[in-house]
Image (tube, rainbow, N blue to C red):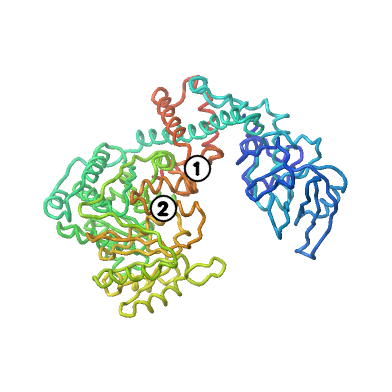
């Protein structure tokens, strides 16, 4: 396999330097190995020949056999297109090309028999096919059963590189260098799990003979990807825990005990107590803590973070909380300083807007140790911010920070501080095992007593009057209301309600109430002013874009109206919903949407109306939309691309890979046993080609 990894793709017949550069830029294919691991995204059955007369709009890709009757070049300049008339004797259809017109008109002749493969569409009551694959009936790529469709980009298609081209290159590579495919798993793993050998799996994934063998190949390749991901993360985590020493917080003193006994705003839930116990165990272990704290909106993560920071203060170190926005940092400051000042804790806020006089005071108190807790934005990681003895760091909504930014907190002390990462975005278990595979995970899965679940409903445009009546009733009771729009200004293309239009409409419908508004393009000072109007209760309605997704805590707000809810993902809708239901009163979330929406969209919104459980919402979102690039970079310290495994649907394989990685590392932590040499070699390749972010929590 090493030889496949070292050969540049330009040396494969039919590619050359210019195409190799394009493949690298568009698909990340640099070597023979990369091409073999560029797997089909899906498969089509090319054993069936359809008739033109039998076409219907539900068909994805079909294969037709017939003859071209004519070719006509239409349009001028950039609008030029080649239109051919094609018949199979049962009916006729149009075939259209917008690119490589000269080459195509020279390649295909009227009267000759061809096989067309593409997606049929109905345009002006005429069936047509745009840029189909065209083969002679004798071609090896035509009418052959299962055929993979490879992921491509528009730029590659414009250069004449299609799925069939990729398929041809893969066949050439398998024919000439297939014998270089070497097994990457140990015999123990492969035999016990009865996995298809790697060379057979790669050949099958590109050339499946039937569905049964295809599924075996997919399982083998998915397991391999997830296994090495888990093995790498678990090895990294074990090594870090064994090497990186941390503060040992041996005592719980007056700061914690005084606050716990006299200042708790409400009794802790069982989940909060459990999480604090887990964190205390880490802080007393002598190794650096790296723990992820998950908790749904309103579950009391900030109080848990404060209690843990008080334990740090009892052990003569300083604490820091970093938030992604000034609004969220200010909210944390108000909450924490309001509670902690009662026990003599000095808390300061540092953001980009902090005036020089206040900044100088912060710098002075940080260095003499009289400043106990610093709360701020990315300003806290600037080089000039120096602590006397930083021992505990909380990072809120950490996915909004880059890995390099977070890593700079490590450099604030000789002994690395304990790290508590907080997120209000519930993360499905399978995703947490991969994205946060090297962090210990704690979950607050209870709401504080007195909180009522938010009642969520879906409403259509023709029900707007009744929605406004409901808003009016809440306002008369002295409550406040959020109204969220997806846009700032009118966009006719998307046909969405805009913030500006909505603001005017709301002012018109509710003339007796003050309306504030915020959006992402406002200057920070103006945004903060508008938000403060709402937070103080002076404004009764806040019209906003999704800038309020995090960082707004107004317990008196009981209604959230989300316009064009069909345009939002489930997790984002759940985050927005979390802005209400923060007080003791019953709260409501109204999802405004078009009456005619796709079935999948309706199902997505119905999930929101059926549950307020953030983890159920996150699981559904993951399955519907896929994991995407949720965290930018895997938290293991090593970037790792998945070619075939799916974090949304392969939960059982993830668990299997996790269990096997733990089993192997328990027996052979450094992979030095002869039987594990293939594992050691493969990991060396993965680590060598990946970006090493090292000690990043």
509 or 269, which is in the foreground? 509
Q: Position of residue 245 (x, y in %)?
A: 32, 38
Say what secondary structure mark 2 lies in: helix
Is the Cβ of the residue at disc 2 closer than 8 Å to that at disc 1? no
398 or 194, which is in the foreground? 194
Side (left or right) of 593 relative to 389: right
Residue 639 disc label:
1
Residue 139 disc label:
none
Q: Quadrant of residue 235?
A: top left
Q: Residue 428, relative to residue 499: is it above or below?
A: above
140 or 602, which is in the foreground? 602
Q: Residue at x 22, y 51 (%)?
A: 448
Q: Position of residue 427 (x, y in %)?
A: 39, 46
Query: Is residue 18 in sight in this rendering?
Result: no
Say what secondary structure mark 1 lies in: loop
Q: Position of residue 178 (x, y in %)?
A: 68, 28
2 or 1: tag closer to the N-terminus: 2
| Image quarter in which the C terminus is found | top left
Side (left or right) of 648 relative to 420: right
Q: Which residue is mark 2?
A: 606
Q: Quadrant of residue 290?
A: top left
């Amino acid at each position: 396999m090493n030889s496949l990894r070292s050969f540049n793709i330009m040396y494969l017949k039919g590619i050359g330097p210019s195409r190799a550069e394009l493949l690298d830029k568009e698909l990340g294919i640099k070597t023979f190995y990369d091409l073999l691991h560029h797997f089909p995204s899906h498969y089509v059955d090319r054993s069936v020949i359809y008739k033109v007369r039998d076409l219907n709009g539900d068909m994805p890709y079909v294969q037709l056999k017939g003859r071209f009757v004519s070719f006509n070049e239409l349009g001028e300049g950039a609008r030029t297109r080649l239109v051919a008339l094609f018949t199979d004797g049962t009916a006729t259809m149009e075939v259209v090309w917008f690119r490589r017109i000269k080459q195509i008109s020279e390649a295909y002749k009227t009267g000759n028999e061809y096989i067309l493969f593409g997606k049929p569409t109905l345009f002006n009551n005429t069936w047509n096919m745009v840029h189909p694959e065209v083969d002679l009936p004798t071609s090896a790529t035509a009418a052959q059963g299962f055929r993979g469709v490879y992921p491509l980009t528009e730029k590659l298609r414009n250069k004449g590189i299609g799925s069939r081209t990729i398929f041809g290159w893969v066949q050439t590579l398998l024919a000439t260098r297939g014998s270089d495919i070497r097994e990457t798993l140990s015999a123990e793993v492969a035999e016990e799990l009865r996995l298809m050998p790697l060379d057979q799996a790669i050949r099958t994934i590109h050339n499946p003979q039937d569905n049964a063998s295809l599924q075996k190949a997919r399982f083998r390749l998915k397991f391999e990807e997830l296994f090495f991901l888990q093995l790498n993360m678990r090895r990294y985590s074990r090594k870090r825990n064994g090497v990186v020493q941390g503060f040992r917080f041996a005592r719980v003193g007056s700061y914690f005990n005084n606050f716990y006994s006299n200042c708790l705003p409400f009794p802790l839930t069982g989940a909060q107590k459990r999480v604090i116990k887990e964190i205390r165990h880490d802080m007393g272990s002598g190794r650096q803590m790296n723990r992820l704290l998950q908790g749904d909106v309103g579950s009391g993560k900030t109080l848990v973070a404060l209690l843990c920071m008080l334990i740090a203060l009892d052990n003569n170190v300083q604490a820091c909380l970093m938030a992604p926005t000034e609004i969220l940092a200010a909210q944390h400051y108000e909450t924490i300083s309001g509670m902690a000042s009662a026990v003599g804790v000095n808390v300061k806020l540092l953001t980009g807007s902090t005036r020089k006089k206040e900044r100088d005071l912060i710098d002075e108190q940080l260095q003499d140790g009289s400043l106990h807790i610093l709360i701020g934005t990315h300003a806290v990681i600037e080089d000039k911010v120096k602590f006397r003895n930083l021992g505990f760091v909380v990072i809120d909504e950490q996915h909004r920070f880059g890995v390099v930014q977070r890593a700079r907190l490590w450099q604030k002390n000789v002994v690395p501080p304990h790290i508590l990462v907080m997120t209000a975005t519930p993360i499905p278990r399978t995703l947490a095992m991969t994205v946060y595979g090297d962090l210990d995970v704690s979950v607050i899965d209870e709401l504080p007593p007195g909180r009522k679940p938010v009642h969520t409903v879906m409403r259509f445009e023709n029900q707007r009057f009744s929605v406004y009546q409901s808003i009016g009733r809440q306002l008369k009771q002295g409550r406040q209301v959020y109204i969220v729009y997806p846009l700032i200004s009118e966009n006719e293309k998307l046909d969405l309600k805009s913030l500006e239009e909505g603001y005017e409409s709301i002012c018109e419908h509710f003339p007796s109430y003050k309306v504030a508004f915020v959006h992402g393009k406002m200057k920070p000072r103006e945004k903060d002013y508008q938000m403060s109007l709402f937070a103080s209760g002076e404004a009764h309605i806040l019209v906003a874009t999704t800038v309020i997704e995090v960082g707004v805590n107004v317990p008196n707000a009981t209604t959230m109206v989300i316009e064009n809810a069909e345009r939002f993902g489930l997790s984002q809708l759940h985050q927005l919903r979390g802005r209400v239901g923060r007080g003791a009163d019953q709260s409501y979330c109204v999802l405004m949407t078009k009456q005619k929406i796709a079935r999948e969209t309706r199902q997505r919104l119905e999930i929101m109306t059926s549950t307020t459980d953030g983890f159920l919402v996150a699981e559904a979102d993951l399955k519907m939309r896929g994991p995407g690039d949720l965290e930018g970079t895997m938290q293991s310290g090593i970037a790792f691309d998945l070619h075939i495994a799916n974090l949304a649907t392969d939960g059982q394989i993830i668990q299997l890979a996790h269990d096997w990685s733990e089993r192997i590392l328990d027996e052979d932590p450094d992979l030095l046993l002869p039987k594990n040499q293939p594992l050691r070699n493969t990991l060396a390749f993965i680590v060598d080609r990946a970006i090493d972010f090292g000690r990043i929590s």
